[in-house]
Image (cartoon, rainbow, N blue to C red):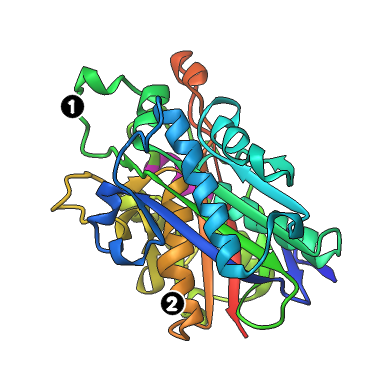
Amino acid sequence: MIRRIGGHTLGFEEMPTIIGYASVAGKKESEGPLGKGFDKIIYDSYNGKNTYEQAESTLQFTAVETAMQKAGVEAEDIDYIFAGDLLNQCISSSFGLRDFNIAYLGQYGACSTMAQGLLMTAVFVESNAANTAACVTSSHFASAERQYRFPLEYGGVRTPTAQWTVTGSGCCIVSNAKKGACIARATAGKIVDLGVTDANNMGAAMAPAAAQTFIDYFADTNTKPSDYDAIFTGDLGLVGSRSLYDLLSLENIDLEPKHYDCGMMIFDLEGQDVHAGGSGCGCAGSVFCSEILNSVNSGKYNNILFMATGALMSPTSSGQGESIPSVAHLINIKLR
C-alpha cells in the first residue's frame, strides 16, 4: 500500500526490492576511483557505431540486458520500463530499448531521471500495476557536448565551475521480493528557479532544488541527516555541494558529515581534470547501480538517501536567455 507522508513524500509499506542492477561506463570513468565497480566498460566512444548518439543507445541496451541477467529475468517478465536521457526527444532511450518489446514510458527529468525512474517503478510495483518494472538512464560526454555546448572540434576552454558529462548508464529491475535493497520512501521534487543562467555552472542552478527537496523530506518524515548511514546526491559537483550546504544551513540542517556526491565520487577531480566534477544522467545512474547499491547489499549501509538532481533547460531556452529551472527527486533505500 502507498501512503502519503506529510505534504510531499510517499511511503511504500511493502517496500519494492531492487532485484537486479547494472552499470555501464566509458573509458574515462573506468579510470576514476570507482572504475573496478562498473559491470561493463565501453572503451570506444563510438562503441562500434557511426555516431555518438547511437553509441549512447547501446549503453542503455547493455545496462538493461546486464541487469536482467543479474536479476534472473527475461524481457517478457518485465511489465514496464521507465527510461530517459538528455538528448532531444530521449532518443537514446527509445532507440536503445526498442528491441526489448517491453511497455515503455519515457521520462525526462534531465539528470534527475534515475531517481524519477526509481520512484515510478516503486509506485507501479507497490500498487500491483506491475509485478516487475525496470528503470534506466544514460548520458554520453560527446553527445551531450554537441547538443548543449559546442562541437568537440571547437576545443573551447572549460570554466572552473563546469562539470564533465559522464559517459555511462544505470539500470534497476524492481519487483516485490522481500530481501535486498528496498525502496522505502520517495519524495518528488518541485521545480525551483533562482535565476541562474550560466549553463557552465549547473551545480549552482540545481542546488536550490536539492535543498528544497531535502527540507520537504526531513519535515515530512520527522527525520534528520544523522538518522541515515549516508546521503548521496547525483551530480551537484564541488560547486553545487557547497551551495547545498549553505542553503540548508539557513534551515539549521547539517548535511555535510553524511553527504557524498556522485559527481565527485566518479572522477579524481584533480588527476582527471574534470573541474567541478561529473554530471549527466549517467553520473547518478552508473554510481547508484554500482558503488551505492553494492555498499547497501554488502551491509555497509542499511538506510540511505539517494537524490538525483536535474537542470530542466534546453539549447533553445539557453539560446533565448532563459534561466535554468531545476528539480530534485529523493529515494530512501533500506536493506532487509
Residue 153 spot, x, y in % from top left:
23, 19
Name the quarter where the N terminus is drawn: bottom right
Task: Tell which of 37 and 334 is nearer to you.
Answer: 37
Q: Residue at x 50, y 34 (%)?
A: 86
Label 1 crowd bin: few (<14), some (14–19), many (20+), radius 10 Å:
few
The CA distance from mark 1 to mark 2 is 37 Å
Q: Secondary structure at mark 2?
A: helix
| Quarter assignment of residue 244 | bottom left
Residue 69 shows in the view: yes
Residue 104 spot, x, y in % from top left:
73, 42
Residue 39 spot, x, y in % from top left:
41, 62
Q: Is residue 279 above or below residue 193?
A: below
Residue 220 spot, x, y in % from top left:
68, 68
Task: Name the residue tied to disc 1.
Answer: 157
Task: Specify the segment rendered in magenta.
Answer: 203-209
Q: Residue at x 68, y 60 (%)?
A: 74
Task: Name the residue tied to disc 2.
Answer: 295
Task: Tell which of 78 and 272 is nearer to you.
Answer: 78
Name the quarter where the C terminus is drawn: bottom right
Q: Earlier in the sequence, mark 1 or mark 2?
A: 1
Label 2 crowd bin: few (<14), some (14–19), many (20+), radius 10 Å:
some
Q: Is residue 170 above or below residue 145?
A: below
Q: Residue at x 46, y 80 (%)?
A: 229
Magenta region, mostly helix, strand or loop?
helix
Residue type at the position of mark 1: Val
Residue type at the position of mark 2: Ser
Q: State if disc 2 and disc 1 touch (CB < 8 Å).
A: no
Q: Nearer the viewer, mark 1 or mark 2?
A: 2
Any magenta on residue 144? no
| Quarter assignment of residue 45 | top left
